[in-house]
Image (cartoon, rainbow, N blue to C red):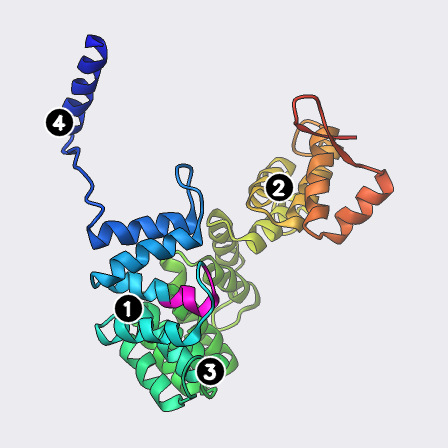
Amino acid sequence: MRNLVLLFFCFVAHLTAHGQMLVKVDMNDARVQYRMGMRYFKGDKYIEQSDTTAVKWWKKSAEQGNLDAMDMLGHCYRYGEGVKQDDQKAVLWWTRAAKAGNRSAMMNLGNCYAFGFGVAENDSTAIRLFEQAAVEPKYMFVLGEKYFFGDGILTRYPLAVKWYEKAAEGGYTDAMYNLGCMYLKGQGVEKDEAKAVEWWTKGAKKGDSESMLLLAVCYQDGVGVKQSASKSSSWLEKAAEANNLVALKHLGLAYYYGRGKKQNQKKAFQLFEQGAKIGDASIQYCLAVMFMKGEGCKKDLQKGALWLLEAAKRGDKNAKKAVDELGISIKSDTDGNKKSE
């Protein structure tokens, strides 16, 4: 017992030395109640997922004025998660939160007015709420999406460009990517390939892999920029490093066949393995083939068959055909591990 007590005080001393303190959690605190609701809503290794229990915690928190809890209650009533579906109650909670300044609730309430969920449809009120929320890049982007796709309001490309630009100026990379696409196609703006490249370059420099991929294509084909095989290759490599699946597959195939790259099956294998672990079915098929042929790796029919089955399960047609032709199936061994045969 003495050793246990000593161990405990050593642990406390360690936490204190690193600027951490053991603090009693006040379960009556609205912020704690909101976080408890989120834990039950998502579930974790300590708490079993439960929408009903999440709602109970959020009601406690909302009653104390927590706006995020009100917003989540609106979500639960709108979609019937943990409570009986009720659009009017969703509107009530979102209205309370929106009036107090919660941006997410403003967007959600705007959707209710745009589509007539729990209230009479009213586009002008919907747009007013959307614009009130759009003081942060995230919601500026969402409003741009609504104008682009006609999501509850009329499609208006010039207004989509306006809000994408505001979001992009705030550093939102998805908006930069979309602006590039709109300038390339001339949607809501005069067509300008150089301007498209400019926006994609900004997005790529901030880490957006989709922008990197399009830059690789632009430099390859000379769209909006002077054609450059080296810059195209560089952006494709960067997109692959950022786990862009299209880039991983194209770069892997380039190394596999020696197209624009010096043939290097080991490098192709590494790229396919990277993409396969992320979950792309077509890349999983490529990896399976390399395992079965021993290309770029040690030949391993077992691993090849397992990746082939995974690719087939995810819908790759080549993998499905190969699985049928080879008659591969899965069974569990005595330890419950999957094995192919």
The Cα atoms of the two marked residues, 4 and 2, are separated by 48 Å
From mark 4 to mark 3, how far is it between C-alphas?
A: 55 Å
First in sequence: mark 4 vs mark 1: 4
The quarter of the displayed image where residue 64 is located: bottom left
Q: Residue at coordinates 71% horizontally, 24% vertically from top-left? A: 333
**Which amino acid type corresponds to the residue marked 1 in the rendered image?**
Gly
Q: Secondary structure at mark 4?
A: helix
Q: Which mark is residue 17?
A: 4
Q: Can residue 105 be seen from the camera position used here? A: yes
Q: Quadrant of residue 308?
A: top right
Check disc 2: other Cα within 10 Å, few if <14, some if 14-19, many if 20+. many
User: Which disc, if any, is residue 268?
Assistant: 2
Q: Quadrant of the C terminus?
A: top right
- Disc 1, SS: loop
- Residue lying furthest top: 2
- Quadrant in which residue 74 is drawn: bottom left
Which residue is under mark 1? 170
Asked if the residue at tag 1 contacts the one at tag 3, i.e. Cβ–Cβ closer than 8 Å, the answer is: no
Q: CA distance from mark 4 to mark 1?
A: 39 Å
